[in-house]
Image: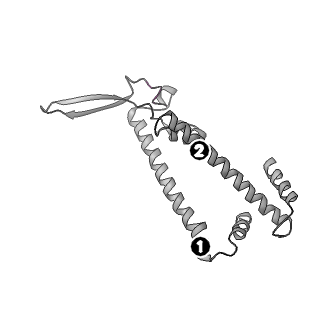
Amino acid sequence: GPFVGTFLARISKGRKLGHFIIATLILPSIWSFVFLGIMGAAQIRMSNQAISAGLDGKTPATLYGTFADKSTIGYSHSYSDDDGNTVTEWTPVPDRITRLYFLGTEDVLFEHLSSYGGQGWATFMTIITLICIVLYFITSSDSASFVVDIMAANGVEEPPLLQKIFWAFTEGAA
């Protein structure tokens, strides 16, 4: 709490209160709501498709559509043809369907990203996602060490650079 408050106060110096509230409360809340709504709904859809295709997740062959036995795992649906006869069609489980519930936490995001488009798209999105995660940690670490440095310097707004480097390395080592 004190770290975030000090950092926000420092970067918001000279701005109006309304702009501060919009930039730190309203916009991040809207972004989180939209992002989690879209990604959550997509993962629910993927899980429902996997369940209805028969992927129970008990073995690798029933966890990923790629490894599934296409003759036994898939969809069976019926419809009426032009003559009024009932026709039943078998559709094997698609390769991109995965039972996300049985995956490890670290795998769910990347399996989710790989379900959109082909292998090239999945690789591209994985690289972009990893770059964003690294940038997030770097900027968060820089902000936290800056605030710790200000607190260690008894509130001096421009503490010595060597001291900031010390706190950054100490935080990184921890």
Q: Which amino acid does label 1 sit on?
A: His
Q: What residue type is labelled 2?
A: Ile
Is residue 133 placed above or below 24 in the rendered structure?
above
State the image coordinates of residue 49 (x, y, percent, origin top left): 40, 38
Is residue 102 placed above or below 149 in the rendered structure?
above
Which residue is at a point 55% across and 39% down the rendered structure image? Answer: 124
Q: Is residue 67 magenta?
A: yes
- Magenta stretch? 64-68
Q: Name the residue under label 2.
A: 128
- Mark 2 Cα within 10 Å, few/some/many (few <14, many 20+)? few
Please say whether residue 59 is visible from this viewpoint: no
Element on which disc 1 rests: helix
Q: Which is the main secondary structure of the residues drawn in magenta?
A: loop
Please say whether residue 126 is visible from this viewpoint: yes
Looking at this view, is 15 or 62 the one in front? 15
User: Do labels 2 and 1 touch, CB within 8 Å?
Assistant: no
State the image coordinates of residue 99 (x, y, percent, origin top left): 48, 36
Of callouts 2 and 1, the N-terminal one: 1
Which residue is at a point 57% across and 70% down the rendered structure image? Answer: 22
Q: Quadrant of the N terminus?
A: bottom right
Answer with left or right where residue 37 lies relative to residue 130: left
Q: Name the residue under label 1.
A: 19
Which residue is at a point 87% across and 62% down the rendered structure image? Answer: 160
Which residue is at a point 55% across and 67% down the rendered structure image? Answer: 26
- Mark 1 Cα within 10 Å, few/some/many (few <14, many 20+)? few
Looking at this view, is 12 or 37 the one in front? 12
Label 2, label 1: how many angstroms apart (C-alpha)?
30 Å
